[in-house]
Amino acid sequence: MSRVRRRMVSEDGYGGRMSNGSGRTRQEGERHLGAVTVRREAIPPSTADERLLDSRGRADWKTKDAWRALRILSEFVEGFDTLADLPQAVSVFGSARSKPHSPECVLAEELGGALARAGYAVITGGGPGVMEAANKGASEAGGLSVGLGVELPFEQGINDWVDLGIDFRYFFARKTMFVKYAQAFVVLPGGFGTMDELFESLTLVQTKKVTRFPVVLMGTWYWGGLIDWLRDTMQAEGKIGPEDLTLMCLTDDVGEAVRYIVEADRALAVEQEARQDAAASRAVTDRAESERRFRRDA
């Protein structure tokens, strides 16, 4: 995809709120249902996630949930197939409501560029605000900019700085892609969705479901109070251990954030190489022992 934007960007420097030429903004009255785009009266009254999780629809479970399972499977297949050849990547999270020139958007754009120059693709939720800023920074720096959108009642569409975009119906399929194809998470100021991604990633690391997954919090003015509460309340009451607080790097410095990710990558590579060497050594020893026993028994 050409790095030259095919549309003029808006006055704030981003392209996510531009008109599509009909006088109507791209996000207004539009929703993406997986590969399907619907507008205006064709938009359904509820999302696929809402229908799936609504316990009041029990009468439909036997007839509809089996078909939903196939649709869910198709989302995983589409995501796996599309992202399988993605280079090393970092998932960046933050608020869709942040204004373009807010401190977090300035940080996100700088971060996206720095990650791209370090050789990482940048994955976001594909929306406006912090996500759009990170995608913009990565794209302008010549990196691969990825957006993983999801069907929402107030959806605003994939932003124009995304080079590779996928629209999901189901949150859990989308969240799998954020983790599976990223070497790290960077979390900037955001709301419930951002907190959800943050604590899910920390839980995966804490429970060793993922290996050495760096989590960076950017925005000390925003996250400082949360870190204090985790230490002074959660850790103080024994709900987490002191080592759990070391799972996060808190910084406002883009260079420090990228270095933290790069160094974690290097440490993991060394660790994996050592494990492979140890496994190869064990295989040689086991083979020699097997041959010795065979000669002895013969």
Image (spheres, helix red, strand yellow):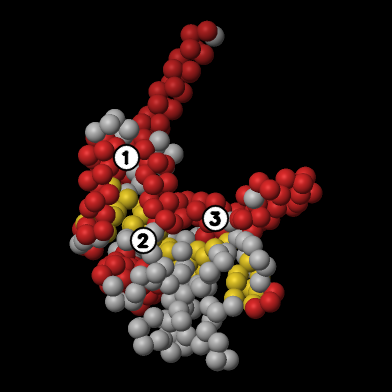
Structural crowding at the residue carrying mark 1, measured as other residues with C-alpha within 10 Å and reported as few (<14), some (14–19) or many (≥20): few
Circle number at residue 109: none
Amino acid under disc 3 = Phe
Q: Nearer the viewer, mark 1 or mark 2?
A: 2
Provide the secondary structure element on which disc 3 rests.
helix
Q: Amino acid at mark 1?
A: Glu
Mark 2 secondary-structure assignment: loop
The residue that label 2 is drawn on is 190
In the rendered image, the vertical position of residue 41 relative to residue 92, given as above or below: below
Q: Closer to the camera, 60 or 14?
A: 60
Q: Position of residue 58 (x, y in %)?
A: 72, 45
- Residue drawn at (53%, 69%) of the image: 154
Q: Amino acid at mark 2?
A: Gly
Q: Earlier in the sequence, mark 1 or mark 2?
A: 2
Decide which of 108, 294 is in the foreground and name it. Answer: 108
Expressed as whole percent of the image width and height from the top left, the position of residue 4 reads: 42, 85
Residue at 71% x, 49% y is 57
Where is mark 3, residue-wise? 171
Residue occupied by mark 1: 271
